[in-house]
Image (cartoon, helix red, strand yellow):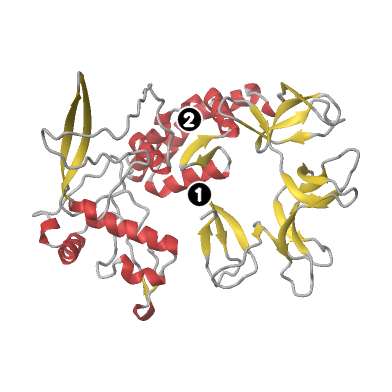
């Protein structure tokens, strides 16, 4: 959007100003342009007498303007046909938010209603919108916020009981972070900059430290362990105020009020001591074994919890003599639930059911009757190899370094490979026989393999 988008006869046009900034400064010509746009789109009633001005937070980078539309003659709907879905939503967010910041405020009446029923007195509080103001363009809602709009009523009205819902409320722990509430917390704590918030969240998700459930972040066992070890061994760096103080020092370096070598020397002096201590004393988690009462179905030994690259897993205590291992999850009470992936595939040797197992070279199908039957098959995807005349199927494989990929079952006769999981569903836009699964910021998307098509959708939508 900043570098430019092809807009037909207009050519390549930049739609927004420079985006790596947290400044709220607005150029006079932008103020003039947005005020004209507000009158044109909504009328004089929505325009304040004087422009709204805002103060940047401490340490904000003021070299650039606030992020805003570059031109007020190009509303989102006018350029929608030239933008991808994500580009349009982002541009509309910037457009709406910028117009809203220069509009009149909303007028809202806070209403309290007292309802008497015999000796009992019930109260209800809510809001009554008198004038929408900037809310006609942009309204920010918390994910857990409930609407508090009360129906019209007047004093003395008799109310009819429709439903009685007795509820007991207990003190609740703070709600889990959503993307927006986490960014708000980072801002309040002075951690990071707008240009780094997305990277912070993406890193947490991609490294498996957290996962998104119902738009809320939940820590994984790996994330809890990493946090515990870092807090134990690097308390100064893990202190919430450390990053904020370092941001301030970087600003001082930029303003030439302090030497960068002094800042680095001060930091490294204590960090090197903590690092040496951690190398000597940090727990070797991969050597830890936590016993369970779960029996190995292969040899009868007890299973134990071990740690691997991707977190906790169950391993037979007789390892390496018995190599049985299982993935598991924990329920709300922390109890172990073994993950078992059943399939509709039948064993090529005995005809029995097959299950998904993890091996040295990735996941594969194994006979459920093992060790009586050692039948195996590569894990198929249901997608036929697109190479003309091949006739093979795309199956899941793994490189020597452990990276999962998808290749033709007729390898080495056919060397077709993909790095993203193919899904046996044709592209509704160009007719490609399959789509690819892609993960972006905690969301799973289905995208067309033809880059010239550009089709994508959120999985499950």
Residue furthest to the left in view is 49
Image point 38% across, 47% down: which residue? 194
Q: Nearer the viewer, residue 235 or 185?
A: 185
Which numbered marker is on residue 441? Answer: 1
The answer to whether 212 appears left or right of 52 in the picture is right
Q: Nearer the viewer, residue 37 or 5?
A: 37
x and y percentages locating residue 129 in the rendered image? 18, 46
Whether residue 222 is visible here, answered yes or no, is yes
Q: Label 1, label 2: how many angstroms apart (C-alpha)?
A: 26 Å
Secondary element type, mark 2: helix
Image point 48% across, 29% down: which residue? 238
Looking at the image, tell me whether mark 1 or mark 2 is earlier in sequence order.
2
x and y percentages locating residue 322 in the rendered image? 85, 31
**Which part of the image, by quadrant, shows the N terminus?**
bottom left
x and y percentages locating residue 196 in the rendered image? 43, 47
Q: In this view, does 374 lie above or below 313?
A: below
Residue that label 2 marks: 237
Mark 1 Cα-neighbour bin, 10 Å: few <14, some 14–19, many ≥20: some
Mark 2 Cα-neighbour bin, 10 Å: few <14, some 14–19, many ≥20: some
Whether residue 249 is visible here, answered yes or no, is no
Residue furthest to the bottom in view is 9
Residue furthest to the top in view is 119
């Amino acid at each position: 959007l900043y570098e430019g988008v092809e807009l037909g006869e207009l050519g390549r046009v930049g739609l927004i100003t420079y985006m790596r900034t947290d400044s709220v400064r607005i150029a006079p010509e932008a103020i003039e342009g947005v005020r004209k746009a507000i009158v044109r789109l909504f009328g004089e009633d929505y325009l304040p007498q004087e422009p709204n001005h805002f103060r940047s937070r401490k340490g904000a980078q003021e070299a650039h303007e606030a992020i805003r539309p570059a031109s007020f003659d190009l509303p989102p709907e006018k350029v929608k046909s030239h933008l991808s879905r994500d580009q349009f939503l982002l541009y509309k967010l910037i457009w709406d938010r910028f117009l809203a910041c220069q509009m009149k405020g909303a007028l809202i009446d806070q209403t309290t209603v007292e309802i008497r029923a015999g000796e009992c007195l019930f109260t209800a509080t809510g809001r009554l919108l008198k004038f929408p103001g900037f809310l006609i363009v942009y309204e920010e809602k918390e994910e857990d916020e409930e609407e508090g709009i009360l129906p019209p009523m007047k004093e003395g009205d008799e109310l009819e009981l429709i439903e009685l819902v007795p509820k007991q409320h207990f003190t609740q722990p703070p709600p889990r972070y959503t993307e927006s509430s986490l960014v708000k917390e980072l801002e309040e704590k002075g951690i990071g900059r707008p240009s780094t918030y997305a990277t912070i969240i993406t890193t947490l998700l991609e490294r498996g430290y957290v996962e998104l459930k119902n738009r809320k972040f939940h820590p994984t066992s790996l994330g809890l362990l990493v946090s515990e070890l870092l807090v134990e061994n690097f308390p100064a760096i893990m202190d919430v105020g450390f990053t904020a103080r370092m941001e301030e020092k970087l600003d001082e370096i930029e303003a030439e009020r302090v030497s960068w070598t002094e800042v680095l020397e001060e930091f490294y002096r204590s960090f090197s001591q903590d690092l040496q201590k951690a190398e000597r004393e940090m727990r070797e988690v991969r050597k830890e074994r936590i016993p369970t009462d779960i029996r190995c179905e292969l040899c009868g030994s007890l299973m134990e919890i071990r740690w691997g690259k991707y977190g906790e897993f169950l391993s037979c205590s007789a390892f390496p003599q018995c190599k049985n291992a299982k993935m598991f999850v924990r329920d709300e009470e922390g109890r172990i639930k073994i993950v078992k992936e059943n399939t509709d595939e039948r064993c090529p040797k005995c005809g029995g059911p097959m299950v998904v197992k993890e091996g040295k070279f990735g996941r594969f199908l194994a006979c459920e009757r093992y060790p009586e039957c050692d039948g195996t098959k590569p894990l198929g995807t249901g997608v036929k190899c697109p190479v003309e005349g091949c006739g093979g199927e795309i199956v899941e494989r793994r490189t020597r370094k452990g990276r999962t990929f998808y290749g033709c079952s007729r390898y080495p006769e056919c060397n077709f490979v993909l790095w993203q999981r193919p899904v046996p569903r044709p592209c509704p836009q160009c007719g490609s026989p399959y789509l690819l699964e892609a993960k972006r910021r905690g969301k799973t998307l289905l995208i067309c393999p033809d880059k010239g098509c550009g089709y994508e959708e959120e999985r499950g939508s």
